[in-house]
Amino acid sequence: MRAPYLERDEEHALATRWRSENDQVALHRLTSSHMRLVIAIAARFRHFGLPMSDLIQEGHVGLLEAAARFEPEREVRFSTYATWWIRASIQDYILRNWSIVRGGTSSAQKALFFNLRRLRARLARGTTGLPDHQIYRQIATAIGVSTNDVALMDARLSGPDMSLNAPVSESDQGASDRQDFLVDGEPLQDERVGTAIDSERRVAWLNDALAVLSPRELRIVRERRLRDDGGATLEALGESLGISKERVRQIESRALEKLKAALLQQHPDTANFI
């Protein structure tokens, strides 16, 4: 903080020496004189709960990146150019370390992360008793995101990370962990294996039974019953086969009866399946 300010000409000369001659002394003087800028920007983000010293260090990384990219011939003050890099470096550090779960992966989420609290506090001061959904709608309009994104980010910012291995009750040392109360809606492994085996067996039975059908019956059954997209209509099949849709329905009904009879004859225990 005691480093002297640089005049415009001196700053330009130092930046030129660093860029053209790789002068480390010039780089040191250029960056040292702008450390107060790093500290000032880092102080704006101190309410995110991260150590101030870490924020300053990350801001210094951004300052060095700005020095590496700065072009003195553009006649722009170094502080003006470096401010963006310092802020971007600090914001990236906060997004990576504020929570175990990475957030702010899109530009909209980053804008929400860094502006939600400020906008909500401003709206709370201006109005009293405003419901959350109206606050979310106003914030979404101001930032240009959806109301659902605002609600989701507000929920994330409302509490710290919580370990699933933490006990439910801190007073009871033998209490269950939080993860013990998570419900998995998926079937158990033995149920999955049993279902897979049954499905393979039924597919084999069906393929054997299809052999009793005539080519036209087989085509109708495949087009109407065995397609993943819902099956063809009676009218479409009738046009392709050159018959009426009522005739297609009759053939389909007869083919299904033949399939049922073949399955019961080959596998009498498939009555429930059919």
Image (cartoon, rainbow, N blue to C red):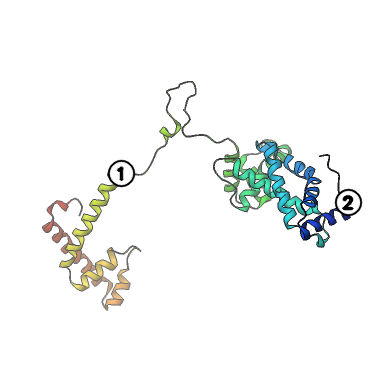
Quadrant of the rendered image containing residue 205: bottom left
110 or 217: which is nearer to us?
110
Q: Where is the N terminus found, in terms of image quarters?
A: top right
Which residue is tagged 1?
189
Q: CA distance from mark 1 to mark 2?
A: 72 Å
User: Quarter of the image containing the C terminus?
Assistant: bottom left
Where, by quadrant of the figure, is residue 253 drawn?
bottom left
- Residue 160 left/right relative to 129: left
Residue at the spot 44% in from the left edge and 30% down from the top edge: 177
In the image: residue 180, left or right of residue 99: left
Query: Residue 171, position in %: x, y?
Result: 49, 20
Q: Nearer the viewer, mark 1 or mark 2?
A: 2
| Proximity of marks 1 and 2: CB atoms separated by less than 8 Å | no
Nearest the camera: 254 or 29? 29
- Nearer to me, 20 or 11: 20
Relative to 104, 27 lies left or right:
right
Q: Is residue 118 visible?
A: no
The residue positioned farthest toward the bottom in the image shown: 242
Tell me what residue is drawn at x 73 percent, y 37 percent: 125
Q: Secondary structure at mark 2?
A: loop
Name the residue furthest left: 265
Q: Which residue is mark 2?
A: 7
Q: Nearer the viewer, residue 263 or 181?
A: 181
Query: Residue 101 in the image: x percent, y percent?
Result: 54, 43
| Left or right side of 244 for 164 | right
Q: Using the image, tell me which numbered label, if any, was put on residue 130.
A: none
- Neighbor class of circle 2 (other Cα within 10 Å; few <14, some 14-19, many 20+) is few
Q: Secondary structure at mark 1?
A: helix
Q: Earlier in the sequence, mark 1 or mark 2?
A: 2
Amino acid type, label 2: Glu
